[in-house]
Amino acid sequence: MSEQKRPLVLLRPVPGDTVIHRLWAGTKLIAVFALAVLMVLYPGWIPIALITALLTAAVLLARIPRGALPTIPGWVWLLILFGGVTAAFAGGTPVVTLAGLELELGGLLKFLRVTAVSFVLLGMGLMVSWTTNVAEIAPAISTLGRPLRWLRMPIDDWAATVALSLRAFPMLIDEFRILYAARRLRPRELPESRRERGKQQVSDLIDLLAAAVTVALRRADEMGDAITARGGAGQLSAAPSRPKAADIVALAVLAVVCGVAGYIEGFTFLATT
């Protein structure tokens, strides 16, 4: 029997009471933003390695089980392999001599670096999703955006919008999966000609879109009634949200990692010029 594929599950925290789970949601958002900016400014192998080590340590501290990792489809690896082979034709330094042939690996290394950055960014997003309750995101955004209120920006409305989006996202995904599964189970006649098959595919797509819109509207109406019964959208961001002592330590570690990576990359750049 083949191993059952594990789907990508987002916005649903892994149960636990570790130090990573207890961190303030704002600290995790600051960490993701700071590390993303670091990789944009210094997309070198040293920052990638340091961030990967930091992410690995966070996974171990949070005790994320191996079963939480999604199964990567085979076509993704084939796409990466095709991209690497295509990028290798771009050439560039460094040049490696193998059996009398000079191989320019510049394009391949750049592609691998971009791929590594993408996986690291995805890992950071998954880490926040696995260790943070969705209800903690809106109060954290409201607290972090408090200075912007001096500019009369609707921070609370933005936080409520983000909270509603995060709450609705998993529900809509489950609804779409049920609709798709139900559609596949419906008996239907197999068309004989290619033109009829095309018409049937277009008709199925239209039916799925109409059903998806109907489900989304129904879910929105139910969520609106629930929010009204609980005191309105303002209650989503009204919960107290403050950093603690552990958050100060985590931000200090983050500052050290960013500082070391920036210093090494800056020193390497100056040494090579």
Image: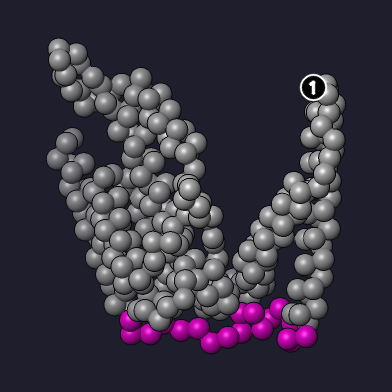
**Residue 137 image offset from top left, x and y in percent:** 54, 73
Residue 114 in view here: yes
Q: Nearer the viewer, residue 18 or 267?
A: 18
Q: Secondary structure at mark 1?
A: helix
Residue 155, magenta (yes or no)? no
Residue depicted at 82% across the width and 70% down the height: 221
Residue at coordinates 80% horizontally, 28% vertically from top-left? 198
Does residue 41 appear in the picture of this structure? no
Residue 97 x, y percent position in the rendering: 16, 19
Above or below, 207 against 156 in this view is above
Q: Say above or below: 48 vs 19.
A: above
146 w.r.t. 52: above or below: below
Give the image location of residue 43, x and y in percent.
Answer: 33, 45
**Segment colored magenta:** 229-247
| Amino acid on which the number 1 mark rests in the picture | Arg
Vertical placement of residue 103 versus 52, above or below: above
Residue at image coords 40%, 31% = 81
Read off the residue under disc 1: 194
